[in-house]
Image: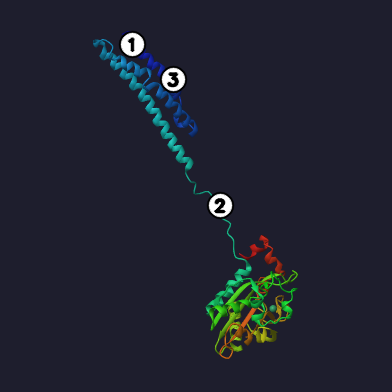
Amino acid sequence: MSEERRNVENIQEAFDREFERFSSLGVDGLSLSDAETALRELGEVKVNHTGKKSPIANAKKLIGKVSPEERGTFGQLVQSVEKHIASRLDTTEAALNALIATARTERERLDVTLPGRRPRTGHLHPITILRQKIEDIFVSMGYAIEDDREIETDYYNFDALNIPEGHPARESQDTFYTTEGFALRSQTSTVQIRAMERRGVPLRILAPGKVFRRDTPDMTHTPMFHQLEGLCVDRGITMAHLKGTVTEWLRRMYGVDTVTRFRPSYFPFTEPSAEFDFSCFKCHGTGKFEGERCRPCKGSGWIELGGSGMVHPNVLKACGVDPSLYSGFAFGFGLERMTALMYSIDDIRHMFENDVRFLEQFR
Ligand SMILES: [Zn+2]
């Protein structure tokens, strides 16, 4: 019997020796990865000392085999060793688990005081800024915004706009022809025809868009640029409506003291035709700014902006509108020139070079 007792006492001693490294471990000061390693190793010790094939499990099987008078004491000894092993393992395991849980929470905690990464937001191109401003004004006057195709047939680009065969605008040195009978539109007036065909009359539209001409790029020319075209057709529309509309728009853009003037001109698709100017927004028509010659108007006090006129009866007829019942006015101008004036940009090519240093100034 003393041999069996001795065996059981040895089981506890063997466990204590192996467990020594865990009891000497200062659990509280462990790093997360050290604690995780310790927990893994503790698991192995637990299997070895409490599993089905562990020495203490074998000792338990002996309880029934010792003599009845010794069985009680022996049983108590085995139970107390088993309890000793289990309690030490459980205590350390619980301490390690608690430490790991805390360390993981700490690691995953968001530090809301850290400065955030600000997303780089873009902004509108100066041409878009101006276009939207003008669109807003015309929409408030009952105009609809029209968009249409950039590749047009000769018919829409020229014939329907009363530009006859042999007119210089139809020459290939002025227009980008694609395939036979098609060209990149050279003016947004093509939208007048398409809109009248689709919507019928009366109508009021504003058509902004890209147009294309075979110009050699320089400070004031690019082969692609933006035009904005306005069209109003109804019964009894006169030149007075044209002047009133253009003047009201420019007053809303540049202030109530803005004055407009119309000079006789010629366009194939309007009759009569006029170019329109407005009093300079910088010098208010005086031609001088801070004692110097005003730059936007070059000292004249006037800024030349665009072309206009009463829609030619042939254009109305081409759209199936009876010119004896209806009349209309149209006007158009280049957005680049207006943008360049507003922002004092001396070279319109800057607008298409995508140089961030240039674009960032229009935030
Ligand atoms: Zn001026």
Which of the two residues, 130 or 202, is positioned nearer the viewer here? 202
Q: CA distance from mark 1 to mark 3?
A: 21 Å
Residue 148 x, y percent position in the rendering: 59, 72
Mark nearer the N terminus (2 vs 1): 1
Q: Which numbered disc, 1 or 3, marks the residue that appears first in the sequence?
A: 1
Residue marked by disc 1: 4
Cα distance between the residues tagged 2 and 1: 71 Å
For label 1, count other residues whose C-alpha is less than 10 Å away and answer few (under 14), some (14-19) or many (20+). Answer: some
Q: In front here: 331 or 14?
A: 331
In the rendered view, would you say 311 is above or below 60? below
* Residue under pointer 3: 18
Badge 3: residue crowd in 10 Å (few <14, some 14–19, many ≥20)? few
The location of residue 290, given as percent across then percent down, is 70, 76
Image quarter in which the C terminus is found: bottom right
Q: Secondary structure at mark 3?
A: helix
Q: Quadrant of the N terminus?
A: top left
Residue 254 placement (x, y as % from top left): 61, 78
Say which residue label 2 marks.
Answer: 117
User: Which amino acid type is marked by label 1?
Assistant: Glu
